[in-house]
Image: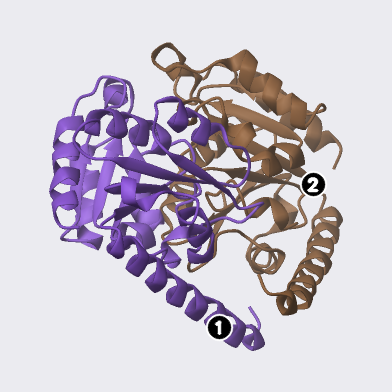
Chain colours: A brown, B purple
Amino acid sequence: MSPDRIPVIERIMGANDDLAAQNRRLLDAHHVHAINIMASPGAGKTSLILRTAQALQGRQRVAVVEGDVASSVDTDKVRAIGVPAVQINTGGGCHLDANQLRGALEQLNLDEADLLFIENVGNLICPVSFDLGEHTRVAIASVPEGDDKPHKYPGIYSAVDALVVTKIDLLPWIDFDMAEFQRLARSLNPDIRIFQLSCVTGEGIAEWVNWLLALAQTR
Amino acid sequence: MSPDRIPVIERIMGANDDLAAQNRRLLDAHHVHAINIMASPGAGKTSLILRTAQALQGRQRVAVVEGDVASSVDTDKVRAIGVPAVQINTGGGCHLDANQLRGALEQLNLDEADLLFIENVGNLICPVSFDLGEHTRVAIASVPEGDDKPHKYPGIYSAVDALVVTKIDLLPWIDFDMAEFQRLARSLNPDIRIFQLSCVTGEGIAEWVNWLLALAQTR
């Protein structure tokens, strides 16, 4: 990267931070707790959101913002279970930014939501650099991705409040050392909260949902 | 993105294309066929390279360039089986570029290689925008990522010569529609060559290796 680009990047990041702060104030004014969910493609972000929204039904009102490079397949799935959802298509962009979230928030009735799940673009690298105005950051790591990912993508493991290990129903068929994986994650982030669950069997969902219910109390 | 950034980006991409052309001439001069391998984190890029290098032993001389945000764990694995490997750490960058590959090529003895595998950073979005000087582009999609990925990441599916579907040993335990997945991929890229394999069982490796052997004849 040439040195003359750096001021440009600083301006972009500063503008993003300002918009993120505005988003957070807007969410706070409506008593909405927002959760930014980041993961690799195919780690199970949408499956987790669907399963969680169903588990929270009648207890907390959920809304969803779906970020994707292209398509609205995830938004269609979320709306199909009766949950309000807005699609952001980044048109090739590899992460969401605060300005995109602002546009999505304008399309939601925030007075009818307690918890807002923001599904970021499938990418372990760039999303974590962009504050959206969320209150809580969650990374998902699926068992089939392997137990070495904290070595390779330390940025995201260092920056999130919680880590959800998904697809644990596949553990019998995959060489994945859960203790080593957790040790690596905690070496980067000693305070990280770690959940293990399967959206197929439902194992572990209750503990994750209880944590979300406690978060919703803080809004 | 503000309009005043566009000339900056054009200069960067133009400079990358020039360096990629230089890399390709260098590789051609040494009769090395280079394959740029792109995939999500955890799709099985390194496992495929290890398994392929072992299958090619005694038939073609292999060298490897490993791209990662951080760590050299993959390079260590490749060297452990006796294959020359060079690590590129992008320091947070979400893709390889031609200048990084040039630095790596200077560290390899190209007269002792027939096939060069370049493992790109784990990311389905950005790597495809940067020509490295490779001759062939391959995407890996692992079964656990799900059969809807071509919908969401059309850029990479449109741009590669071949698609390797990995982890097919997990098909009995995962809801993955192979016919639908292939139909989606071919709707974006009618000429795409598709392989299905498992690095655990070895199923499908021979067909993939035979294709590589044919590629190596063209160098």
Residue A197, compared with residue B178, is above or below; it is above
The residue labelled by disc 1 is B11
Regarding residue B161, the answer to whether it shows in the image is yes
Question: What crowding class fits label 1: few (fewer than 14 Cα within 10 Å), some (14-19), or many (20 or more)?
Answer: few
Asked if the residue under mark 1 is in contact with the one under mark 2, i.e. CB atoms within 8 Å, the reply is no
The image quadrant that residue B152 belongs to is bottom left
The reply to the same-chain question for discs 2 and 1 is: no
Task: Residue A109 in the image: state x and y as whole percent.
Answer: 68, 59
The quarter of the picture where residue B201 lies is: top left
Using the image, name the chain to which the residue with label 2 belongs: A
Residue pictured at 80% horizontal, 34% vertical = A215
Residue name at image x 25 percent, y 30 percent? B57
Determine the residue positioned at 66% across, 83% down.
B2
Does residue A57 appear anywhere in the picture?
no
Query: Of A185 and A196, which appears nearest the observer?
Result: A185
Q: Quadrant of the C terminus of chain A?
A: top right
Describe the element under mark 2 as helix, strand or loop.
loop
Which residue type does callout 1 highlight?
Arg
Q: Name the spot of residue B98 as percent of width and height, x first.
A: 48, 65
Residue highlighted by disc 2:
A135
Q: Chain of mark 1?
A: B
Closer to us: mark 2 or mark 1? Answer: 1
Q: Is residue A108 left or right of residue A197?
A: right
C-alpha distance separating marks 2 and 1:
38 Å
Callout 2 amino acid: His
Task: Work out which quarter of the rendered image holds the N terminus of chain A and state it.
Answer: bottom right
Give the class, few, some or many, for how many residues have Cα within 10 Å of label 2's Cα (few <14, many ≥20): some
Q: Quadrant of residue B8?
A: bottom right
Spot occupied by residue A143 in the image (x, y as percentages of width and height): 50, 25
B142 shown above or below A116: above
